[in-house]
Amino acid sequence: MRLKLAEALLLRADRRRTFEQLRNRAQAAARYQEGEEPPEDANALLVEAEEALDELETLIRRVNNTNSVTTLADGRTLTAALAERDVLALRYALLSGLADAGAGNAQGRVGRQMRSELRVLTAVPVSELRDRADTVAQHHRELDALIQQANWNTDLAEV
């Protein structure tokens, strides 16, 4: 049975969660009081956690290999598209955060209360920043849809 890239991504996330749970359980069972039984066998949990890490490493290698050889319709590799998507998310956060700050929407912000107080001025073009943020968000959604489509249409490469 061929595994699709999207399925491998789901498995990768599951392996990470499993590892984190096993790590936490092993750490919790690493010490116990004299005269009591440990809640779980920390050594057995360690073995399970290492097995989960081995599976995770294999999945990461296969996903990365697949991303580097898979191309989208415009000729970009999936790796390049993922990098662009990540930067678009950061760019959106930058633009929308700056627009919010300029509009006075920052947490803890208190507006002018009395006429004699100094006015607070906006140093950035809030409307323009919001328009740019909307454009970036739209581009992010469109690119994400292309990436998701590729994930479900692409077979996972062997290592």
Image (cartoon, rainbow, N blue to C red):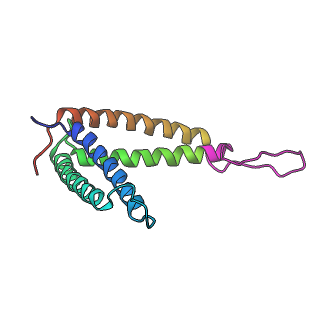
Determine whether 140 is above or below 18 in the image.
Answer: above
Left or right of 61 on screen, residue 129: right
Instruction: Depth check: give the residue in front, 138 or 147.
Output: 147
Left or right of 17 on screen, residue 35: right
Determine whether 38 is above or below 11 in the image.
Answer: below
Q: Position of residue 19 (x, y in %)?
A: 31, 52
Q: Residue furthest front?
A: 35
Instruction: Depth check: give the residue in front, 115 or 147.
Output: 147
Left or right of 61 on screen, residue 114: right
Q: Position of residue 4 (x, y in %)?
A: 17, 36
Q: Residue furthest bottom?
A: 34
The residue at the point 28 percent across, 56 percent down is 49
The residue at the point 31 percent across, 48 percent down is 18
The residue at the point 43 percent across, 45 percent down is 89
Magenta stretch encompasses residue 86 = no
Magenta residues, as a range?
100-125
Left or right of 4 on screen, residue 35: right
Determine whether 58 is above or below 151 in the image.
Answer: below
Determine whether 48 is above or below 143 in the image.
Answer: below
The residue at the point 39 percent across, 36 percent down is 139
Magenta stretch encompasses residue 102 = yes
Instruction: Depth check: give the residue in front, 108 or 11.
Output: 11
Q: Quadrant of residue 13?
A: top left
Magenta stretch: helix, strand or loop mostly: loop
Q: Count of labels shown?
A: 0
Q: Position of residue 8 (x, y in %)?
A: 22, 41
Quarter of the figure that contains the N terminus: top left
Q: Position of residue 37 (x, y in %)?
A: 39, 59
Instruction: Depth check: give the residue in front, 126 or 6.
Output: 6
